[in-house]
Every structure is written in C-alpha cells, then in structure tokens.
Image: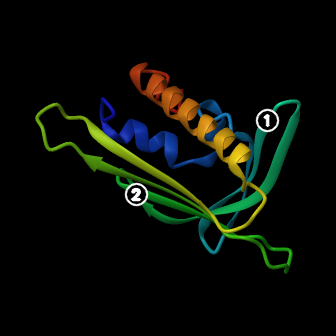
C-alpha cells in the first residue's frame, strides 16, 4: 500500500522523464515529438553488473492514458527494423479501507534476450526494489512528489 493521494503517485509514473528521480535503472530520458498524438520519449536503461554496465536505448510511446488510474508505455522504434517488445504498465488501485491509501502495480514486460539470465535478473530485481523504496520516499515528502516543483 502507498500512502497519500493517488494523483501524486500517478504524476510520478505518468511521465517517463520523471523516472530517473526514483528509478536508477532509467539512466536518461528525453521527450521527443509525439507519435500519432501520443507522448513519446527516448529512454536509456542501464544496469550495473560488477564492473560492467549494460544499457539499452528505447523509444517509448504512452499508448494508454487514464489519468489517476492507469498508464501504459510501449516500445515503438521508427528505424524500420523489427525490435523486441518492451511494455511498461502502471495501475493504481484504491484501498477499500478508510485509510485513503492505494496500491500501485507496475509491470515491465520484455520480449527479447538482452536482459535474461539469473545474474541480470537479480540486478533488475535489485533496481526494482530500490526504485519502489525511492518512489515511496518521494511520496512521503509532500513537495517532492509534485513533478511541477
């Protein structure tokens, strides 16, 4: 469960340019001109494995946008080549108790083989755990959770 209003959390997952502030797997992000009316970003993912770093550049398009509830980003390269799919989805679920908290589910689906193997899976799991903690920390700070400030 995540404390506070879901709008604050949604602002942190709705714009890929904000991800480097809480997800260290996302190394660099630049918003580029929209694709078919959908916001679009160039994203560089980077994971450290001992002294080695693996990185991947992706062009991601926000294909689902339900403010305050759900957002989905999909890889959409424009170089004419076939690429492995990457899909990032975030969904907010209200808490049924009186606390006013909510649950944030995020999934990253990858259909290729760059990030496979037990060692890299552990590295990705570590990034996800640190990202979840950092996101929780941002949400606990009233002004820091507002990307406009």
Residue occupying the point 73% across, 54% down: 115
Q: Give the residue displayed 75% in from the left and 63% down from the top.
A: 113
Q: Residues within 10 Å of mark 1 (few under 14, many from 20)?
A: some
State the image coordinates of residue 139 (x, y, percent, origin top left): 42, 27
**Disc 1: which residue:** 48
63, 104: nearer the viewer: 104
Q: Position of residue 68 (x, y in %)?
A: 36, 50
Mark in the foreground, 2 or 1: 1
Neighbour tally class for label 2: few under 14, some 14-19, many 20 plus, Cα within 10 Å: some
Colour option used: rainbow
| Label at residue 70 | 2
Left or right of 99, for residue 128: right
Disc 1 element: strand
Q: Kindly indicate the quadrant of the structure image that contains residue 41.
A: bottom right
Q: Nearer the viewer, residue 105 or 6?
A: 105
Q: Pointers 2 and 1 in contact (CB under 8 A)?
A: no
Q: Is residue 135 left or right of residue 1?
A: right
Mark sitting on residue 136: none
* Quarter placement of the C terminus: top right
* Element carrying mark 2: strand
**Residue at the (41%, 38%) spot, across then down:** 9
Q: Earlier in the sequence, mark 2 or mark 1?
A: 1
Q: In the drawing, does residue 95 fall left or right of residue 148?
A: left
């Amino acid at each position: 469960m995540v404390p506070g209003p879901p709008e604050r959390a949604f602002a942190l997952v709705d714009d890929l340019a904000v991800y480097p502030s809480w997800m260290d797997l996302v190394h660099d992000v630049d918003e580029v001109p929209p694709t078919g009316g959908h916001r679009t970003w160039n994203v560089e993912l980077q994971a450290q494995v001992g002294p080695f770093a693996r990185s991947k550049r992706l062009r991601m398009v926000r294909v689902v946008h339900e403010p305050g509830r759900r957002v989905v980003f999909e890889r959409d390269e424009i170089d004419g080549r076939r690429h492995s799919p990457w899909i990032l989805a975030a969904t907010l679920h209200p808490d049924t108790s009186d606390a006013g908290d909510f649950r944030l589910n995020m999934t990253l689906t990858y259909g290729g083989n760059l990030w496979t193997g037990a060692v890299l899976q552990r590295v990705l799991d570590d990034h996800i755990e640190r990202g979840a903690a950092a996101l929780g920390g941002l949400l606990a700070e009233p002004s820091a959770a507002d990307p406009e400030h």
